[in-house]
Amino acid sequence: MTPTHKSLFAGFCSLALMILSIGSSQQRGLSQQQTTAPLGASDAPAQRQVTRENNPNYPARNPFYFEGKIDYELLGIDEPANAWEYMQRGIFRQDDQENYREAIRDYQRALELNNTENGTCQIVTAVTENFNTLDPAPCIFTLRLRLGYLLIHDEPEESIRLFREVLEIDPLRLEVHFLIAEAFEFLAEETADKQERTALYWKAIEEFQAELALTPPVDNPELSPDQANNAHTHWLLAEIHEKLGRYNEAIEAFENYLKATRWHSDVLPWRIQLAEKKIEELRGMVQAQAVSAPAGRTAPSRARARAAPRSQ
């Protein structure tokens, strides 16, 4: 090894010893700090406890409750304390956990705490002087919509009652009349009494028509070429008319369905061809009725056919 190499080697060894010495002293200093620090002391700042008042994910009532869904786990609620919190937990159980039984229980508990009958909520129709501090709180329509939807098959009458309350809160809320009509249709299919079934079908027709009245087509081809809206409602309306033997009305409803799907198709596109086929079949049935009608009698007019069941 040359003198130069020896000198370099000695320098590297000195540098390595110095680094090891610094590391050891730092480790000893850290050990001393840990030993001498008071028990339980921490350099990290204490975290502020999250409450309903300071949680940015918890919207304050203003005076209405927030009707949408909030990630329930972000609310930091151990146990619901009011109607809105029970509703949010119900939404979490319904949407995220798909635990419909527990969701129904939460919604029903929320309804007990947000009810006009016991004075825990009110229907707001105008701005008053004490608008920002309304007491009792406004009634929550999302709660009633979701509970009614979950009960529509097993308890259609209760669903109808809840949907009626939604319309009291928000008369222009879309799809509520549609849901009421479906509930009446379920009731009609469950009853064995023909007269009662007919009356229930007529109630469904009235609700479907009320739904259509909220979504009329724009009477301006330059703004929209649609000649009808709400295809699914027209479809179900046509089916009920057909069940009642009102074939002309069924044809009209199927034609409106085709108008509504002309530019927007259908989530079930096969129904478009089926509607065209149904129209042909129904026209044949109307012709058969006209041929089989006794001499001197004509088939009932639309006005008479429409008026008779409504009086029931």
Image (spheres, helix red, strand yellow):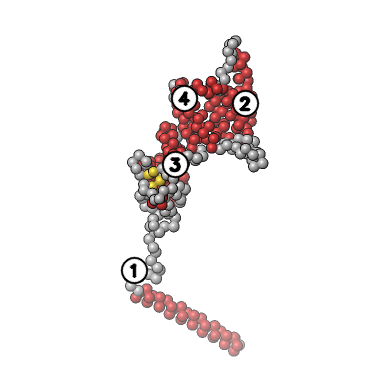
Front tag of 3 and 4: 3
Disc with the residue nearer the chain's start (3 vs 2): 3
Front tag of 3 and 2: 3
Disc with the residue nearer the chain's start (1 vs 2): 1
Residue closest to the eye, 211 or 231: 211
What amino acid does circle 3 point to?
Ile
Q: Are marks 4 and 2 in contact (CB under 8 Å)?
A: no
Residue 268 appears in the picture as rendered: no
- Looking at the rendered structure, the secondary structure element under dot 2 is helix
Residue located at (50% from left, 32% from top): 207
Disc with the residue nearer the chain's start (3 vs 4): 3
Residue 128: image x %, image y %?
Answer: 41, 48
Residue closest to the eye, 283 or 105: 283
31 versus 167 height, above or below? below
Front tag of 4 and 1: 4
Q: Are marks 3 and 2 in contact (CB under 8 Å)?
A: no
Residue 124: image x %, image y %?
Answer: 42, 44
79 versus 37 height, above or below? above
Q: Are marks 1 and 2 in contact (CB under 8 Å)?
A: no
Residue located at (59% from left, 15% from top): 298
Residue 123 appears in the picture as rendered: yes
What is the spatial separation of the Cα atoms under label 3 and label 1, in whole angstroms? 55 Å
Residue located at (52% from left, 83% from top): 15
Q: Are marks 4 and 1 in contact (CB under 8 Å)?
A: no
Residue placed under numbered mark 3 in the picture: 169
Total count of labels? 4
What amino acid does circle 2 point to?
Ile
| Quarter occupied by the N terminus | bottom right
98 versus 18 height, above or below? above
Residue placed under numbered mark 4 in the picture: 199
Disc with the residue nearer the chain's start (4 vs 1): 1
